[in-house]
Amino acid sequence: MKKSVNYFLVIIIAIAASAGTTWFIMHNTKPEIILTKTATGDSLVSVPATYYGFTSLPAAGETDFTKAAELSVNAVVHVKTTYKSKTQQYLNDPFFEFFFGRPQQRETPAQMATGSGVIISEDGYIVTNNHVIDKADNIEVVLNDKRQFTATLVGTDPNTDIALLKIDATGLPAILMGNSDELRVGEWVLAVGNPFNLTSTVTAGIVSAKARNINILNAEMKIESFIQTDAAVNPGNSGGALVNTRGELVGINTAIASQTGSYSGYSFAVPTSIVQKVVNDLRSYGIVQRAILGIKMQEITPELQKEKGLTTLQGVYVAELIADGSAEKAGVKEGDVITQIDGVSIKTGTDLQELIGRHHPGDTVTLTILRGGKTITLTAELTNRQGGTTLISKQDEKIVLGAQFEQLSEETKEKLGINYGIQVKNIKNGKIKSAGIPDNFIILKVNNRTIRTEDDLNEIVENALTASAHDKVLFITGCTPKGRIKYYAVDLSE
């Protein structure tokens, strides 16, 4: 009994001693003295000692997403698209028909697809992905309250995979617009959409990375600077909302990284810093006012750094300058490294593309570059895709080509055995006339890309106008109204 009491007293004394020692250290130890560099020389700064064994980080924020879900779910819509049945037809080929007979025509059934969209204004403007509505014959929007509307396509931008729709309605529950620049890696976000036709679905995750380029857009002037998250996104979520915990829109869900076609860990969204610029341009001008810096850039790798003798791995390397482009006029030289734009650090080409993509032709930007180990600041006036500094319109491509274009009639398609192409009309002075292309000529392909609509042609012309001099050419394949195949080259460089 006596031994047990002694053991108990020893334990009590040990606990008291430990607590007393801790209290003494926390309250009586002098601050650490740290020698720091200042603008005027060395100085002694007193900094309280930090004892990591006795302190803790502040508690993490609550993970209650109900308010954010309530603010966003009614602003996300179900987008349904239909594609008319088409007859698979073939161009007349007398040689083929002589030996094998005329190919049999086949009709493909009408198809349907679904996706998501986000209401961004009370009067019916809805943003979605371009790939959700691309080449659709009819677009239907279903609100969260089950009301249905036929949507009008305002405009598209394949370079960012953003499209703008409009429905005839007022008083709609528009989403709050947030600032994607303020997002931090590790921050909670919600993905709201209609995966697998399951309407009004909300999933949660964190921001895994920013300014991610995954090379999924099929456009020569593509801007990929995705927000990467681990919020579950599946087919049908495309065009839906990525929101922060305040219920503000910070991105448009666009893609997933998957080998199966379903979610397997990561999803990607176009940030609102890009979405807002594209949407505003589509509403105001019908097309995106793309600003051009006029360089061909190269990512800086350890190998390139060693080869070129660079002093940094940050920024982008100027591999080539577009003749008479914005950068060349500003004094940028091949071999320069662009490290900042308007004071914002550039780590990769994706960063540069996103920052330039926010501007309009005629805007000026401040470039910070490294040249020969020295930092230089230059001012560049950005141009449009035709080399000027003014805003452009949808008619500018027509002015350059000097012609109008019409969809083929069903009669013409049946006569020639084709199911795509556009017809040249009302030729005036311009590139079409200079190339010798006759009136009523049917354009089937340009630069080996199938032409189904005038928008297809405009996109190729837009890309060619911003290319280097030797790439400013349209190689056109088509046929006469009598079915004779012909080829033309249209030079846009002059």
Image (cartoon, helix red, strand yellow):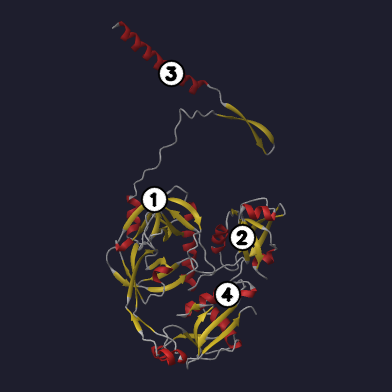
Circle 4 sits in a helix, a strand or a loop, which is it? helix
Closer to the eye: label 3 or 4: 4
Circle 1 sits in a helix, a strand or a loop, which is it? strand
Where, by quadrant of the figure, is residue 18 drawn?
A: top left
**Vertical arrangement, residue 51 with respect to residue 111, above or below:** above
Which amino acid, mark 1? Gly
Give the numbered dot on residue 464: 4
Whether residue 171 can be seen here: no
Q: Position of residue 167 (x, y in %)?
A: 36, 71
Closer to the eye: label 2 or 1: 2
Furthest toward the front, the residue is: 99
Question: Residue at the spot x=35%, y=11% of the render?
Answer: 7
Closer to the eye: label 3 or 2: 2
Where, by quadrant of the figure, is residue 202 drawn?
A: bottom left
Which amino acid, mark 3? Ser
Question: Residue at the spot x=45%, y=47% of the render?
Answer: 186
Q: Position of residue 373 (x, y in %)?
A: 71, 52
Q: Name the residue under label 2.
A: 298
Circle 2 sits in a helix, a strand or a loop, which is it? strand
Which amino acid, mark 2? Gln
Q: Name the residue under label 1.
A: 205
